[in-house]
Image: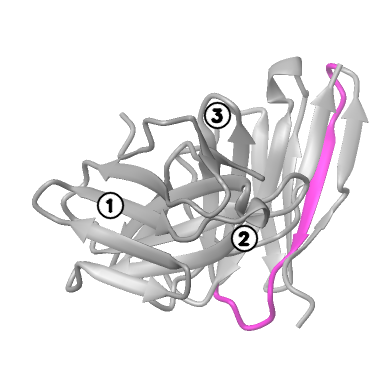
Amino acid sequence: DAGVIQSPRHEVTEMGQEVTLRCKPISGHDYLFWYRQTMMRGLELLIYFNNNVPIDDSGMPEDRFSAKMPNASFSTLKIQPSEPRDSAVYFCASSLALGRDTGELFFGEGSRLTVL
Amino acid sequence: DQQVKQNSPSLSVQEGRISILNCDYTNSMFDYFLWYKKYPAEGPTFLISISSIKDKNEDGRFTVFLNKSAKHLSLHIVPSQPGDSAVYFCAGGGYGQNFVFGPGTRLSVLP
């Protein structure tokens, strides 16, 4: 398997623009996670899905953030409108299960977002 | 409220010596722990795990120790190598709970 695939790897945009980040999880993984990495907070969970259904979105910072998973092989994280404080690296991860020995997370390479 | 804490943002160690990275957690429901390693411009990769029924797990140069009563775990790397220089994340989880990550510790192994 190719692993978790994210795009774009880098995105530079201006404040107020819409940003869409994309993720293809590992085939057969039932869980998909969106994380944000910042210097201050490390790896911060934004939202996760189980079988394409959002389970916990309590980490989504504001209504400007939204995530969808229309099918088992694709998810998007959208920021509209974007702000400079959204600048971070966004990681997508997938796993077979939740929180146990089969719950090892496999991460993508991340999408580095810069909002000017 | 941070459920997983890594109080040392950075650590420098001489090549060949032992690196000890520490992690504390507050959630008593956590019963499984992971360590991830992250190089610049790459995603985190799984390194080693430990279940709460154990107090030690070893994999080559990497050993994780768990002290449940203190809610503390540590990752030992012996001997440390320059290629070990990375950010290390500790994470705690449990049945039906997603893993919660700490803020990470940046390890620099000096040649």
Residue under the point 34% across and 44% down: B22
Q: CA distance from mark 3 to mark 1?
A: 30 Å
Residue under the point 74% across and 49% down: A110
Looking at the rendered structure, the kind of residue marked 2 is: Ala
**In front: mark 2 or mark 1?**
1
Marks 2/1 same chain: no
Q: Chain of mark 2?
A: A
Near mark 2 (Cα within 10 A), the count class, few <14, some 14-19 or many ≥20, is many
Q: Please state which of residues B41 and B2 is positioned toward the viewer in this rendering.
A: B41
Q: Residue A78: x and y, percent?
A: 74, 40
Position of the C terminus of chain B by quadrant: top right
Looking at the rendered structure, the kind of residue marked 3 is: Pro
Looking at the rendered structure, the kind of residue marked 1 is: Leu
| Rendered image: mark on residue A111 | none
The region drawn magenta spans: A15-30
Per the image, the residue denoted by label 1 is B73
Whether residues under marks 3 and 1 lie with C-beta atoms below 8 angstroms apart, the answer is no
Position of the N terminus of chain B by quadrant: top left
> Of helix, strand and loop, which one carries label 3?
loop
> Of helix, strand and loop, which one carries label 1?
strand
Magenta stretch, main secondary structure, is loop
Residue under the point 47% across and 68% down: B61
Q: Residue B31: x and y, percent?
A: 23, 63
| Rendered image: mark on residue A61 | 3
Q: CA distance from mark 2 to mark 3?
A: 19 Å
Whether residues under marks 2 and 3 lie with C-beta atoms below 8 angstroms apart, the answer is no
Q: Residue B101: x and y, percent?
A: 44, 46
Per the image, the residue denoted by label 2 is A93
